[in-house]
Amino acid sequence: MAFGNLFKFRSQDMAIDLGTANTVVYVRGQGIVLNEPSVVAIETLNGIKKVKAVGNDAKMMMGKTPDSIEAIRPLRDGVIADIDVAEQMIKHFIQKVHGKKKLFSYPEIVICVPSGSTSVERRAIRDAASNAGASQVFLIEEPMAAAIGADMPVTEPIGSMVVDVGGGTTEVAVLSLRGLAYTTSVRTGGDKMDEAIVSYVRRHHNLLIGETTAERIKKDFGVAQAPVDGVGHTIHIKGRDLVNGVPKEISINQGQIAEALGEPIGTIIEGVRIALENTAPELAADIVDQGIVLTGGGALISGLDAALSDETGLPVTVAEDPLACVALGTGRAMEDELFRGVLTTA
Ligand SMILES: Nc1ncnc2c1ncn2[C@@H]1O[C@H](COP(=O)(O)OP(=O)(O)OP(=O)(O)O)[C@@H](O)[C@H]1O
Ligand SMILES: [Mg+2]
């Protein structure tokens, strides 16, 4: 029975990808158990702020809240925009996964934090996890977690390049022997793509659309390169006419969406180019063989791999489950002694 108890004890250990768009939780021995938007709805009543909803429930409220409720994303552009709300969110998710087994366990938690977070913010995130019941908290760098999750040869003396296109940032890193040989981060990811669609539709159609609508257009019809016929699918979108203020519907095609996404995609490709220019020759030679691996939700934009391959002349592949890579890699780093060296406490 001792082993049974021991197993229960260990089974509460968690790995968390605290992303600017999504938070993903992995439990030791179980894999991914939670994947929800990093959104918190705050209600202010008589000057007192209270958490109204977190995750999926809160995201559904985005752009549709009455004055007393605000749906916010505490992590934005790869940094922690509101540390108090971020703390509440992380505690909420830990407790949701923890359920009622709290008395029994003091889990170890490994968290992947946004790369742009400062040491003060990292400490606050660690404290939030400790307050939620963690006995020990470790941190891991996002590109390392992404590469482990994508099954890249990070422990070997082979250079490989991972490009994680998240909501807030794109991390570009060259890895070898459990270390980051080179890393750079551009503040362009899925959010900037959504903003680019919003502003394109405003400029070309005088139509105001919300972030959520723009994100849906991007996910369903977004393309990194113009379709062969220059047009592709045509879709209808609804919003508010900027001239007369009433709701209206317009149509837009994939060629136009590719044009709208040109700037953010160009910035991402430029980040990769800079990383390649700064990579030591021996590692660069490995990357020619290994190619570049894309992870993060932004990797799902249709044709991003082809666009990057055209620009760099290198083979580019999309990881198997790009949205889960960072959480899977964080989980593996927690479970497998081989990766222990990549965890830090600060
Ligand atoms: N099918 C899809 N096509 C295009 N973009 C997508 C798709 N699915 C998700 N995304 C985008 O991926 C982004 C979220 O990716 P991910 O969960 O990797 O980010 P994150 O880890 O939360 O952010 P960060 O790493 O910057 O902190 C969002 O901008 C989302 O709109
Ligand atoms: Mg991420």
Image: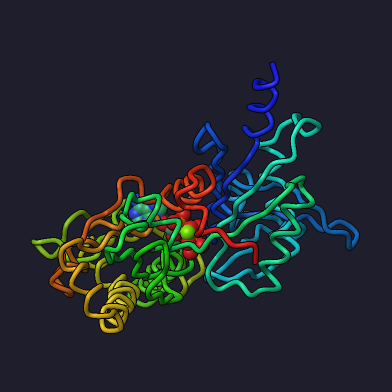
Up the image or down, 213 lies above or below 122; here it is: above
Residue shown at 47% from the left, 45% from the top: 332
Give the image location of residue 290, x and y in percent: 20, 61
Numbered label tally: 0
Q: Nearer the viewer, residue 294 or 341?
A: 341
Report the residue at 70% width, 23% height from top.
5
> Residue at 57% of width from left, 68% of height from top?
76
Spot the residue most to the right.
Answer: 46
Can residue 213 be seen by looking at this rendering? no
125 vs 267, left or right, is right
Q: Residue at x 77, y 51 (%)?
A: 51
Could you say which is closer to the camera, residue 84 or residue 235? 84
Quarter of the image with the C terminus is: bottom right
Given residues 286 and 49, the one toward you in this image is: 286
Residue projecting furthest to the top: 1
User: Is 60 on the left or on the right of 214, as rendered?
Assistant: right
Q: Residue furthest left?
A: 229
Residue 202 x %, y %: 40, 73
Residue 308 sits in which quadrant?
bottom left
Q: Position of residue 207 (x, y in %)?
A: 42, 68
Residue 255 at x, y = what percent?
20, 65
Q: Quadrant of residue 33?
A: top right
Q: Quadrant of the N terminus?
A: top right
Please, is residue 274 above or below residue 228 in the view?
Answer: below
For the rendered model, the colour scheme is rainbow
Q: Nearer the viewer, residue 225 or 278?
A: 278
Tell me if residue 316 can be seen: yes
